[in-house]
């Protein structure tokens, strides 16, 4: 791996397999961005599927969508409380 490539990737070392090691700061930043991408995707899910599910169940789309949003937010809040120990 070239020095320019390592620098662009935030790599500080190349291990014996040729894989770049990255700094903790870069790993945290990328992990945070990845988590935010997943969160944002899930938060938009009720608006996309609520009307479809409501039509299939013959219920009010707005009511179902709001219910899905609330349950999803509660679930994401619970997940956000989880911690990973390294």
Image: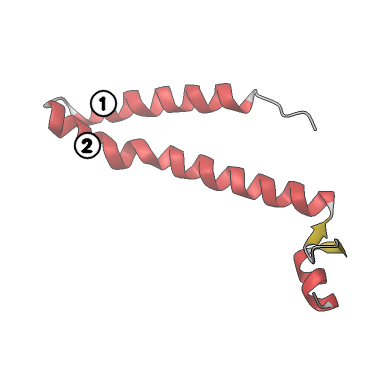
Residue 72 lies, with reference to residue 41, above or below; the image says above
Q: Whole-Å distance between the Cαs marked 1 and 2?
A: 8 Å
Residue 85 vs residue 65, the one in the foreground: 85
Q: Which is more toward the observer, 36 or 16?
A: 16
Q: Is residue 20 left or right of residue 30?
A: right
Q: Residues within 10 Å of mark 1 (few under 14, many from 20)?
A: some
Residue that appears at 25% across and 25% down: 63
Q: Which comes sooner in the sequence, label 1 or label 2?
A: 2
Residue drawn at point x = 52 percent, y = 40 percent: 39
Name the residue at the left extreme: 58
Q: How many marks?
A: 2
> Which residue shows up at 15% across the image and 25% down it?
59
Residue 21: give x, y in percent of width and height: 82, 58
Helix, strand or loop under label 1: helix
Image quarter (top left, top right, bottom left or bottom right) of the C terminus: top right
Q: Residues within 10 Å of mark 2 (few under 14, many from 20)?
A: some
Looking at the picture, tell me which residue is in the foreground, 67 or 42: 42
**Image-quadrant location for residue 55:** top left
Q: Which residue carries the number 1 mark?
A: 64
Q: Which residue position is annotated with label 2?
A: 51
Q: Is residue 83 above or below residue 7?
A: above
| Point 34% across, 27% down: residue | 68
> Would you say the residues marked 1 and 2 are in contact, meaning their CB atoms lie under 8 Å apart?
yes
Which element is circle 2 on?
A: helix
């Amino acid at each position: 791996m070239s020095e320019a490539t390592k620098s662009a990737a935030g790599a500080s070392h190349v291990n014996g397999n040729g894989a770049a090691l990255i700094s903790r700061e870069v790993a945290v930043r990328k992990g945070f961005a990845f988590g935010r991408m997943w969160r944002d995707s899930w938060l938009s899910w009720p608006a996309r599927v609520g009307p479809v599910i409501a039509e299939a169940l013959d219920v009010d789309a707005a009511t179902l969508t709001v219910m899905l949003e609330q349950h999803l937010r509660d679930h994401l809040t619970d997940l956000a409380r989880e911690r990973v120990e390294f």
